[in-house]
Amino acid sequence: MSPIRKPPPFNGRTLVIAAAAIVVGVVVLWLASAALTARHNGRTTGVSTGGIVELGNASKLAAQLERGGGAPLYFPDVSGNDRRAVYVTHSGQRTSEGWHAFLAQVPGEPPSCQWQWNARTRRFDASCDPARHAGASGLGLEQYAIDVVRGRLHLDLRAPLESGTATTTPPTGSPTTS
């Protein structure tokens, strides 16, 4: 007798069980991914104009604006469905009031044309047209409701504010000096 033990003969059954386990694992992961994707898409595209988005702690965002020397905060695609980006400003003494949110897209232009903050002139310039400008306050641009709830800043993208509920200036297609 040999002191070295021979391995058992190859068992095809083990290979089949291992392959089946891998296939089942892949199918389970695929189904979980499909379910999560459907749930996410239902939330973000079910309402074409977006929903209510929590932007963060109002005190921290106000401090960030103050440190930025008045430059507005830019939130790309806050709706979650590639429909809009917004700028947020704060003009109040308290963090619970004085917030404004407006659409970053230049009116009448494709989504890729957005307002870009110009720190030197302290106004917005259109990325697609150097002759178009908007004032630092964003007045006259498409405005959205923004509110502080339990210290958190909430942006309502379901519908722009009506012209009667926000102060507006003339259309922003012409140069401004503000």
Image: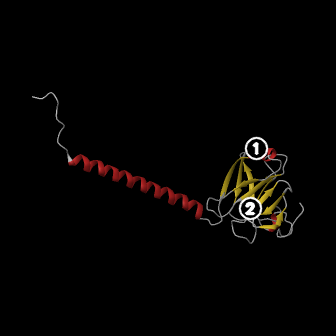
Q: Position of residue 57 (x, y in %)?
A: 71, 45
The residue type indicated by label 1 comes to Ser
The relative height of residue 11 versus residue 142 in the rendered view (above or below) is above
Q: Residue at x 57, y 60 (%)?
A: 43
The residue at the point 77 percent across, 59 percent down is 116
Quadrant housing the C terminus: bottom right
Residue 12, horizontal then vertical, whole percent: 21, 48
Name the residue beneath numbered marker 1: 59
Query: Which is more toward the observer, 149 or 56?
Result: 56
At label 2, the amino acid type is Ala
Q: Closer to the observer: label 1 or label 2? A: 2
Q: Position of residue 50 (x, y in %)?
A: 65, 62
Determine if residue 35 is in view.
yes
Measured in 3D between alpha carbons, the distance from the residue under mark 1 to the one under mark 2, in whole angstroms, is 23 Å
- On the picture, is 103 further left or further right than 31? right
Q: Residue at x 50, y 60 (%)?
A: 38
First in sequence, mark 1 or 2: give its number. 1
- Give the residue at the far bottom of this rendering: 108
Q: Residue 155, located in which quarter of the rendered image? A: bottom right
Q: Is residue 137 visible?
A: no
Q: For residue 104, which numbered disc appears in the image? A: 2
| Mark 2 nearby-residue class (10 Å; few <14, some 14–19, many ≥20) | many
